[in-house]
Amino acid sequence: MSVADVILGSVLVFISFFVLLYSRKFPHFVVRGVRLPGPSFFPRILAVLLLIFAVYIFVEQFLLRKRKALWEEHRIDAKSLLNVLWISLMVLFFFPLASLIGTFITVSLMSFLLTVVLKAKWYEALIFSFAVALVVYLIFGVIFKIPLPGGILLAKLR
Amino acid sequence: MVRKALVLVLLAAVMLLAFAANYPRKPVTIICPWGAGGGTDRLARFLADELSKKLGQPFTVVNRTGGGGAVGHAAGAYAAPDGYTLTLVTLEIATMHWMGLTDLTFEAFDYIAQVNEDPAGVIVKADAPWKTLEDLLNDIKANPGKYLFSGTAAGGIWDLARIGMLDAAGISPDAVTWVPTTGAAPALVELLGGHVHVVTCSIAEAVSQIQSGQARALAVMADERHPMFPDVPTLKELGINWSAGTWRGVAVPKGTPSEIKKILEDAIIEIASSESFKSFMQANGFGIKIRRGQEFYEFVKQQDQAWKKVLELGGYLQK
Amino acid sequence: MQLFDVLKPDVLFPLLLSMLFGVFVGAIPGLTATMAVALIIPLTYYMKPVAGLAMVLGASFTAIFAGDIPATFLRIPGTPASGAAILDGFELSKKGKGSLALMLDLFCSALGGLIGVVILITVSPPLAKFALQFTHFEYFWLGIFGLSMAAVLSRGNTIKGLLSATLGLLISTIGIDVTTGYPRFTFNVTELMDGVSFIPAMIGLFGLSEVLKRTSEKSRLQLSAVSEVVRPNLKETFAHIWNHKFTLLRGALVGTFIGALPGAGADVAAWVSYGVEKNVSKDEELGKGSVRGVIAPTSANNAAIGGTWIPALVFGLPGDSITAIVLGAMLMYGLRPGPMIFTQSRDLVTQLFAVAVLIQILLIPVGWLGIKAFSLFVRLKTSLVMTAVTIFCIIGSYALRNSVFDVYVMFVFGLIGYVFEKLRIPLAPMILGLILGRTVEDNLRVGLIKTKGNFLPFLTRPISLALFVMIVLVLIVPPLTKTFSKKKV
């Protein structure tokens, strides 16, 4: 039995019930007295499908028990999970930080930290992160004129 | 003590004045709530270029799309009221809050100037049986439920234009069926393919099809005839008291200093009266309609109420 | 002669520039050909119309090809149209045959593009007329056919593949319902009104999840991300192309036709072409690194660009977001797109066709440059490459709509992608569901509005019926014959 698949099945059941209940408040769609498929039509079909998949997974896991536990095959060690956490934090805090200290510095800083976390040599990381920041600035900022955050703190200095 | 305070107040006033008079001192952003390359975007970029030349600081267009215009309008309304974020507001500011798409209303803005208005047209395929709008309306009355209209999404501006027109002509909006599409272009595809019977969309969006003889305009929903198609009658001439169309203008967040608003208003009015603006609008098939700040505000206010009624008729009103 | 005007520097130079630009745009996820064109257009007001249109064509053809480069090397599609390249292209690259995959990609893109352009030149008006026959009923079946690919993409674990597609479809229902104007599952978040933005979702699902996966394999961090040295083996490439010339032709024809439909573009074309190839060739290796799986979608998506110009020139109706911008620009040049353009602006149209053919030739050296440059980048250490990819995922998702919200969308889909891969749920069906969800739902429901709730026209209209029969034949018959032949044995 695979714990992961059982969790997956439960999540599917949850999503499915959520959609079924939430779509109850969607309005009906009536054109001149004829009731046509409305906003809830499609989501509900999909929710029922998900429920069927969930049942299938449960049956497979509890009754047939034919599957090997897949999760165990590639169990992730704590260290690599740490990398995942690092990258997640980086994605989440990129723009909050950039709006403070500017995109250029944020890109340099974050890519430096990440390359170091990923065990690159520090001088490699330094050169590389600076190069990435420059390329980002040139392509997105200069050529595409994307309004990347300039940073409140830097604006004060000017 | 009093004297000291007075001096301070005076100093502050002078500084504020000096600050305002120096506008703009850094690059200005114009938020366009619609996608790059579209009609609104082209207008925004034209205005940005002209404003940069006129006021000596770069004006850059930023597209903030999504939510049927809600995202861009909200971004513009909630920006700092310092005159460095302008918004190219479109008609949707008066309709979307009634549909429950956003809490933002037209009151969130101070209005600088309106520059454009495009009336809706009643457009049919070139080989359609109706020669006049009257033919069409009589046919609809005789065959309720038979004909398909299209132009944009359900509850979109061209749907509302259709509802208003039928109501003003004394026909139930239910007498025709609205085929929702994602915009005027796919609706024109449907029309030319013979899959819908009538498209009510901006005349500007169908200029190519009308001029090349693939489609015909039966009427235009405006107070005056369209300069490009002087043969097409207005609804009012046909005895139907209804005008509808989209419009565009420039607005700033509420609370922007009035000196800055004055500078912007004068600059935009000057641009809108120029020859190059006229030829730009002509090339795009856009109509010119200039309203100064206060007048523009009154207009938006009146539009807000007018569309509320139509949305209610169509059953789209959410609050 | 007017025709050779296109070889003069005032056309050729901007064209080359726009093609180099297209390589960047295509290879960096988050920069789209549409953005590039919107950026180019204002510059072109000061040029000859033909130079401006040449730049648009150059950028869009090159970008669609270049989108396959990161898809092949890193399994990150650069554009939505290169979604199918993450299958066989990436599998080949994993086997150390990345340069073969990309050489095939390059030449088939050019040849597919050429076929599309030739069709554009020769049979535009009748094809455009035929395309106008398609309406909601037909688009519905086209969407269903595309969705049926989900089963193919999830071989080995059909249930999980279908599950992934269903989730993709469910996510596609988020946002304002076009048919009624009612906001579904948006929880009053303005950014969700137009639905989950597709490109950030795609960047997360493939880009970020790939980063998360690779950085958890500690042993490979100090090795090259892609160790293969890219070198062109023309003999092998041409041998493959010759052996699969019908695959190429089918792909290009399917691509051009779908491009010519105003309601579908290069992304749908690539998937449908993949599906057609699967059904025609019965190639069991498809999806595991088959040469056919590279050729079919790539020739289709480039051919589709030629296709999108067909309704644009013939009716003045846009087939996708790029031609929509172009039609606006044409008005600014003082041109009136529509049937009259072929007579009124004959010289311009002729020159435009010449440029389109020229681009296919120029695509080979420019595209090769792109492949070479990208391969230098991916030969860096995995740790460095993954850092850069992370940064580009973040900025790319933001750049699309200047929206921080989209960065979080990208992040959520990155986590979904990571977890799904751990659970062995295939990701490609989910993208398919996201692309085609609205196509299927809206066309079904709007179709029913037209018919007042009657489903029969979906089956009785000639083209609808033909599509339906085709779907039944390819979906139901092969499994049946398989079971019966098994029973015989």
Image: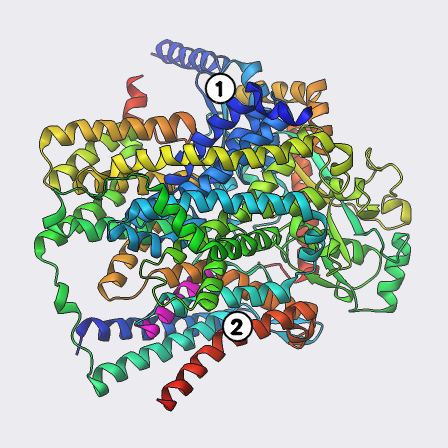
Q: Nearer the viewer, residue C280 or B165?
A: C280
The range drawn in magenta is: C157-174
Residue at 49% over, 63% down: C276
Where residue C47 appears, as percent x and y from the top left, is 60, 21
**Residue C172 among those drawn in magenta:** yes
Dot 2 alpha-carbon crowd within 10 angstroms: few under 14, some 14 to 19, many 20 or more: some
Dot 1 alpha-carbon crowd within 10 angstroms: few under 14, some 14 to 19, many 20 or more: some
Chain ID of residue with mark 1: B
Both on one chain, marks 1 and 2? no
Where residue A16 appears, as percent x and y from the top left, is 38, 73
* Type of the residue with mark 1: Pro
Q: Quadrant of the N terminus of chain C?
A: top right
Q: Nearer the viewer, residue B251 or C231?
A: C231
For residue C197, say whether it is visible: no
Residue at 62% over, 54% down: C261
SS assignment at label 1: loop
Mark-to-mark CA distance, 1 and 2: 50 Å
Where residue B126 appears, as percent x and y from the top left, is 83, 51
User: Dot 2 corresponds to which residue?
Assistant: A41
User: Dot 1 corresponds to which residue?
Assistant: B58
Chain ID of residue with mark 2: A
* Type of the residue with mark 2: Phe
Eyeballing the image, is B83 above or below B213?
A: above
Lateral position of residue B178 relative to residue C167, left or right: right
Name which quarter of the figure residue B190 lies in: bottom right
